Image (cartoon, rainbow, N blue to C red):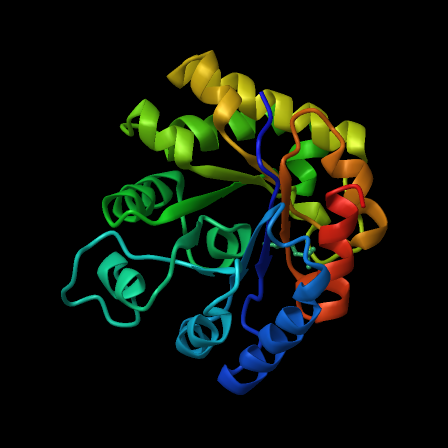
Amino acid sequence: MSRKVIIAGNWKMNKNAAEGKALVDELKAACGNCCCCEADVVVCPPFTTIGAVVEAVKGTAIKVGAQNIHWADNGAFTGEISGDMLKSAGVEYVIIGHSERRQYFGETDATVNARLKAALKYDLIPIVCVGELLDERESGKTEEVLTRQIRGGFEGISADEMAKTVVAYEPVWAIGTGKTATPDIAQAAHAHIRKEIAGMFGEEVAEKVRIQYGGSMKAANARELVAQKDIDGGLIGGAALKAGDFLSLIKEALGK
Ligand code: 13P
C-alpha cells in the first residue's frame, strides 16, 4: 500500500505574524515548479501567527497546523486553545504530545490521549509525537517506551480515527542536536510503532497510518530516511524555518 508523503514544518516558538507570512510567501513563489502537491505539506506556526499564515496559504496546497490543542470545548483554562478555536481559524492539522511539551509542560500519555480525542472531535488531523529519551535508548528501553506511549496515547479511539491520525517518531536525542537517527535505527522504531498500531487496530489500519520521522531531518538526509519502508515523511524543526531549506528537503523526501 502506498502512503502519501507528509512533510510538516513545526515552527515551534519562532516567527511572528509578519515573519510567518514572509516565509509562506517565499514557499509560494517557489510553488511554480511545485512538488508540494505530490506530498502533503503542512506548516505549524505559533497560535498568534496562524491567522496571517492561513491568509497567506489561500489558493495553494499548503495546509496549516497548530502546535497544541486543549481537550475541553471551552471554559476556564487560561492560556489554552480549543479545537473549535483552531477549526474556526482555518487550521486543519494539530501537533499533539511533542517531546518539548512532555519535557517542559508536564504532558503525559493521558493528556495526549485527551487532546487527541478533542482533535478528532473537531475533525482536525492529529500529528501525535512519540519518542524515547537518550538514556531510555541507551538502556535498551526504546521499544518499551514507544509501546507505552502508543497504547496510552491512542486508547479509546476508533479504527477509522486511527487511520487518519499521523504519528511522528521523534527520538528526543535527535531533536535540535544535529544527531539524526540513522535510516536503520529510524526504520526499526517505525516498524515497531506500526506493529503496535496493528496490535490495537488491525493490520489494515496500521498499513494506512502515516508515520513521520522527526529529529534533525534536513535536505541532506531526507531522501534516505523517507526511502525506508515505514517512514512516510518528516516533522521538521530547524530546517522548516527557511523556505529554501524546507523546499529542498521536500524535493529530497520525494526522491526528486
Ligand atoms: P529539529 O528538526 O530542529 O531537530 O526539530 C525536530 C522537531 O522537534 C520537530 O517537531
- Would you say 173 lies left or right of 73 here? right
- Of residues 27 and 31, the one nearer the viewer is 31
- Of residues 46 and 27, the one nearer the viewer is 27
Name the residue: 85% across, 51% down: 220
| Quadrant of the displayed image that contains ligand 1 | bottom right
Q: Quadrant of residue 87?
A: bottom left
Name the residue: 76% across, 51% down: 251
Q: Quadrant of residue 28?
A: bottom right
Residue at the front extreme? 32
Above or below, 61 relative to 187: below
* Quadrant of image for the N terminus: top right
Q: Is residue 153 visible?
A: yes
- Name the spot of residue 191 as percent of width and height, x first: 63, 22
Residue at the left extreme? 75
Above or below, 20 relative to 160: below
Name the residue: 76% across, 37% down: 225
Above or below, 185 relative to 56: above
- Of residues 13 and 42, the one nearer the viewer is 42
- Would you say 233 lies left or right of 13 here? right
- Of residues 67 and 44, the one nearer the viewer is 44
- Name the spot of residue 243 as percent of width and height, x first: 70, 70
Q: Is residue 141 visible?
A: no
Give the number of callouts.
Answer: 0
- Would you say 219 lies left or right of 61 here? right
- Would you say 52 lies left or right of 86 here? right
- Name the spot of residue 125 as percent of width and height, x first: 39, 46
Name the residue: 33% across, 27% down: 160
- Name the spot of residue 188 as percent of width and height, x first: 70, 24
Residue at the bottom extreme? 18
Above or below, 153 relative to 107: above
